[in-house]
Amino acid sequence: MFKKYQRFLVKNRNKGIPNLMLYLCLTNALFALYTLFTKDSTVYEVLCYDAEKIFRGQIWRIATWLLTYGIENYDFSFMSIIYIFFYVMFNNWLGQILESVWGTLRLNLYYFGGALLSVVLSLIITATTGIPVPLSAYYLNLSLFLAVATLIPEERIMLFGVFPIKMRWLALFDVALILLNILPLLAIAVNSNVAEILLMVLVPPLIPIVNYVLTFGKDVRKLLPTGMGLKQRKRRMDFKKAAKPNPNWASNYRSVTGEKPYRHKCSVCGRTDTANPGLEFRYCSRCKGYYCYCIDHINNHTHIEQ
């Protein structure tokens, strides 16, 4: 079944919405800039995710929350505009990498699959417990970053345009940062037995990460420093060792007759440069052919005329 699914993705790799992340990021940026300059949050309040309002019939929020990432966190400042610019550039770059490796269809399924999974679980929790679970596109974008970091963990990017850092370490730092933000809230929820805090904290980051793990399976280990695997590391070490030239390769080698390999051998006495390291050898220009002689016989031999 899985192989059929893979063949389906390969066969239809160019179907779907091309440049998906570019369109999503630009739309996010437009709404954010509008909110910044007008100081009016009406657009955000209409488009953001709200499970209770979805149950009342505002079903567009199932999709439009993907266009409201971070609007509520912006303020009217130069740094906010710079952040929006880099947000568009960086997430579009991630989308281009995944689209070139996976194809348009798989990227669409990965992103929208994570979004749909988040919405469905959030609606189920809200319907059964009455607890509204907020959703943010930040974690979906993080799942994109984790996907790229898994595909090219050794790729370096310039942090702040100055410091080169591998994708692997940046992704692990991102995950660690999320855990550091979650753990204190989890401690409060466990100690006070507050299910609402527990659900609101766990669900938004958990679903996209689960989608990422289901997509990559065992390949998730590539994100870890030892993700290459001990066997693969051993094969690489053995290959490098075998490929490295040994300057003393001739010292332990023996032919069938027991003779060590040599580069020069005297045509008269048969001495070689391997058996006699200090002995000099010359080639005679008067002999017809490629004949070598030691220093004792270079001037004391019968020239070969044919």
Image: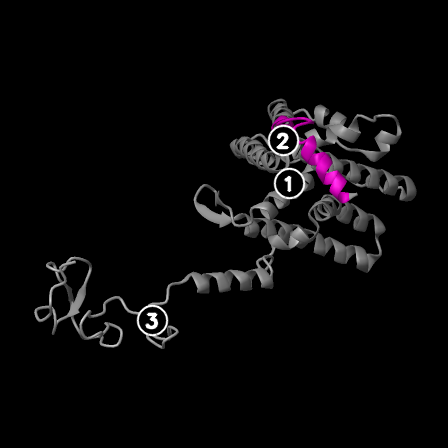
Q: Which residue lies furthest to the left in this view?
A: 299
The tag on residue 248 is 3
Where does the magenta region start and end? 2-24
The tag on residue 15 is none
Characterize the magenta stretch by its predominant secondary structure: helix
Taking depth in this image into account, of 108 and 244 the one nearest to the observer is 244
Q: Position of residue 295 (x, y in %)?
A: 12, 71
Q: In which quarter of the image is the N terminus?
A: top right
User: Is 220 on the left-hand or right-hand side of 198?
Assistant: left
Q: Name the residue under label 1.
A: 144
Q: Where is residue 260 in the image (x, y as percent from the top left)?
A: 32, 74
Q: Where is residue 277 in the image (x, y as percent from the top left)?
A: 22, 75
**Mark 2: amino acid:** Met
Q: Is mark 2 on a helix, strand or loop?
A: helix
User: Is 14 on the left-hand or right-hand side of 1?
Assistant: left
The tag on residue 21 is 2
